[in-house]
Image (spheres, helix red, strand yellow):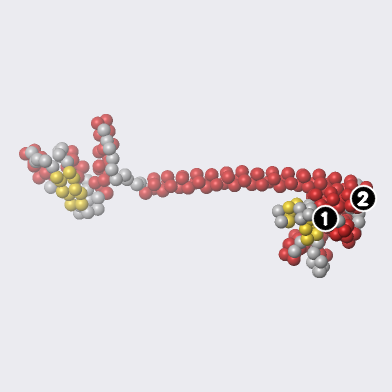
Amino acid sequence: MEQKLIKSEIEARIFTIRGMQVIIDKDLAEFFQTSTKRLNEQVKRNALRFPDSFYFQLDQKEKQELVAICDRLKSLKHSTSYPFAFTEHGIAMVATLLRTEVATKMSIHIINSFILFRNNVNFGQLLYQKINSIENRVVEEAKRIDLIFSKLETQLQPKSGIFFDNEIFDAYVFSSELISKAKKSIILIDNYIDETTLLQLSKRNKKVHCVIYTERITAQLKLDLEKHN
């Protein structure tokens, strides 16, 4: 049997139950060319050599799940007993109890398969974590981009601004947009009112009322106001 058994067949009989990689007693007995009954008898006679980390018995739910995912173990469905699961340490211990050349050689092949299986699982988990991390970063970047486009689409206008001598045009554009967006009224407090200011205010909607507070009204400003009105 050892010559016919390939690595993929051993790996196909390794299951992860309760967070541990195990082989069911039925499969282990087949690997060691003995009966399941004799294998379990050897374990019971040497119970002190088999702590919980070496083997455990499946409960009803675990048995049902195992039968559901593995057609080869369908015969367990109607069995009244619950199979035992052996970790790699338990498998090595069973091999020493059976004391057969087949069990010794097969235990080495099985343990090597356990190591390879575990490395593949760890690599898969690491790869999943990296992919998940990249996906999270992509989602966060997409949210930021959506927020930027949202602001561009709504053309959010700042409520205030500070402009310097070399930013006259920027200040003009800023104030003109505010005036054009007024809905009901505009209140302007400025001691430097001139024709340019009135020209900007002429861009307001017709129903928007405007009040200007300034320190003094010159003769020229009075003429400009009458012309504006």
Q: Amino acid at mark 2?
A: Arg
> Can you give x and y, in whole percent of width and height, for residue 72 in the image?
82, 60
Real-space Cα separation, disc 2 to disc 1, in angstroms: 18 Å
Q: Residues within 10 Å of mark 2 (few under 14, many from 20)?
A: few
Residue located 81% across and 69% down the image? 80
- Which label lies toward us, 2 or 1? 1
> Can you give x and y, in whole percent of width and height, for residue 189 in the image?
17, 44
Q: Amino acid at mark 1?
A: Leu
Residue most extreme to the top: 166
**Quarter of the image where one finds residue 166:** top left
> Can you give x and y, in whole percent of width and height, for residue 212 in the image?
15, 46
Q: Secondary structure at mark 2?
A: loop
Residue most extreme to the front: 48
Q: Please name the residue that numbered disc 1 is placed on.
A: 48
In the displayed structure image, the side of residue 70 where residue 157 appears, left or right: left
- Residue 45's place in the image compared with 122, above or below, is below
**Callout 2–callout 1 Cβ contact below 8 Å:** no
Q: Nearer the viewer, residue 199 or 108?
A: 108
Residue located 76% across and 53% down the image? 53
> Can you give x and y, in whole percent of width and height, for residue 204 in the image?
22, 48
Q: Secondary structure at mark 1?
A: helix
Residue 200, visible in the rendered structure: yes
Q: Please name the residue that numbered disc 2 is placed on.
A: 99
Q: Residues within 10 Å of mark 1 (few under 14, many from 20)?
A: few
Q: Earlier in the sequence, mark 2 or mark 1?
A: 1
Residue located 22% across and 46% down the image? 203
Q: Nearer the viewer, residue 161 or 119?
A: 119
Residue 68, visible in the rendered structure: no
Residue 206 — which label? none
In the displayed structure image, the side of residue 199 where residue 150 appears, left or right: right
In the displayed structure image, the side of residue 62 where residue 72 appears, left or right: right
Residue located 83% across and 53% down the image? 49
